[in-house]
Amino acid sequence: MHKSCNLRPLVGKIRYNWDLIAANLLFGANFSMLVALVRSGIDFRTLFIWQVVVGALFFVPTALLSPRTYRIAWRDLGRIAGVSVLVIYGWMYLLLWGSTYTNPIDSAIIATLGPSLTLLMDRLLHRGERFNRSRLIGLGATFLGAWLLIFDKGFQLTRGTAAWGNLLVLGAVVAIAANTVLIKPTLERLGTRVVMGWYYFIGLAIALPHFGHRLNIDELLRLPLLVQGELAYLLLFGTVWPMWLLYRGAEHLTATHTALYRYIQPLIAGTLAHLRHQAQFDRTNLTALVLIFVGILLTVIGYRRSVQAIRESLAPRRFRQRR
């Protein structure tokens, strides 16, 4: 009996690791689906409003069923309202807009900047602990990788070019990194179900007045069957399900887990893009991927060293208190 009780936390953590793995697998395929749908003639703003509507249909009812919804504090509600704009217009809208100009491989590689940007945002917004040498070098390597992708063809950010698309995707990653830092305390207090429900409720309220006229079911039914299947994947397995898994895993695991699993995305996106003739890995892609991977690895090592140093500094104090 004692052994089985001890195994419960371990089993729970394994489940949340699998949540992050599954979320990144689905998000990796998502980049290929986005590009395919945009190239088939569907406007990215139509995809955007359908993502918001379907997300609201799934998450708002589950939030209403949670008793925590009716005990939410005004402070948490205000924070959720502000962060909802980052999720809806910063992450979802910019990512779709950027995908109209770039390719799945570049988008997925830029998305792996998320963990480094999250640590940087935490430092800027919360004045966290000072960066050690490993973390500074890691951040420099990741930003150098992003620089190579965005300015591979020169320093001209002309609207409608691949560089412009990559910059929009980078903006989306910055928005979701800020969201991760700002919403973490509220997420731990209220849980994934309540936070996601309010995200999409507020998102629906701010998106419908501008994009509601694009909700045309007849237009979607006239699409080819393959395109309809890709659209269904985008709305269900590219939006609703991976967002739920990602937030549930992030709620119970550390930022280190989220950082390391993020590298599943470019592998899946690159494989699908190659098989579907959407893009190919080239020297710039691979160099940027290696730089960002090394950067994240150094950042994680630096983070673990900082945590260890803090624990060691607190250990003598605790010992004195016990005495």
Image: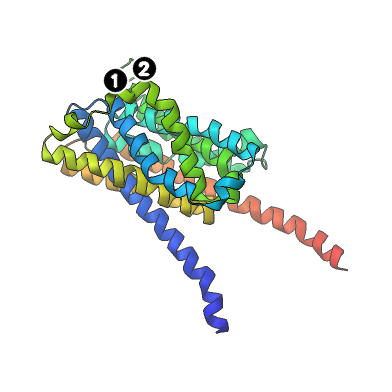
Vertical placement of residue 201 versus 214, above or below: below
Count of marks, rendered view: 2
Residue 92: quadrant of the picture: top left
Residue furthest bottom in the image:
1
In this rendered view, identify the residue nearer to me: 252 or 45.
Answer: 45
Measuring 35% from the left and 30% from the top, which residue is drawn there?
Answer: 149
x and y percentages locating residue 296 in the rendered image:
48, 45
Measuring 33% from the left and 30% from the top, which residue is drawn there?
Answer: 49
Which residue in the protein does label 2 denote? 157
Measuring 11% from the left and 36% from the top, which residue is drawn there?
Answer: 224
In screen coordinates, is 199 left or right of 227? right
x and y percentages locating residue 164 in the rendered image:
35, 21
Tag 1, which secondary structure?
loop
In screen coordinates, is 111 left or right of 9? left
Vertical placement of residue 158 versus 190, above or below: above
Quarter of the image for the C terminus: give it.
bottom right
State whether residue 178 appears in this view. yes
Tag 2, which secondary structure?
loop
The residue carrying pointer 1 sits among few (fewer than 14), some (14 to 19) or many (20 or more) residues within 10 Å by Cα, namely some
| Amino acid under disc 1 | Thr
Which residue in the protein does label 1 denote? 161
In this rendered view, identify the residue nearer to me: 13 or 299.
Answer: 13
Q: Are marks 2 and 1 in contact (CB under 8 Å)?
A: yes
| Amino acid under disc 2 | Leu
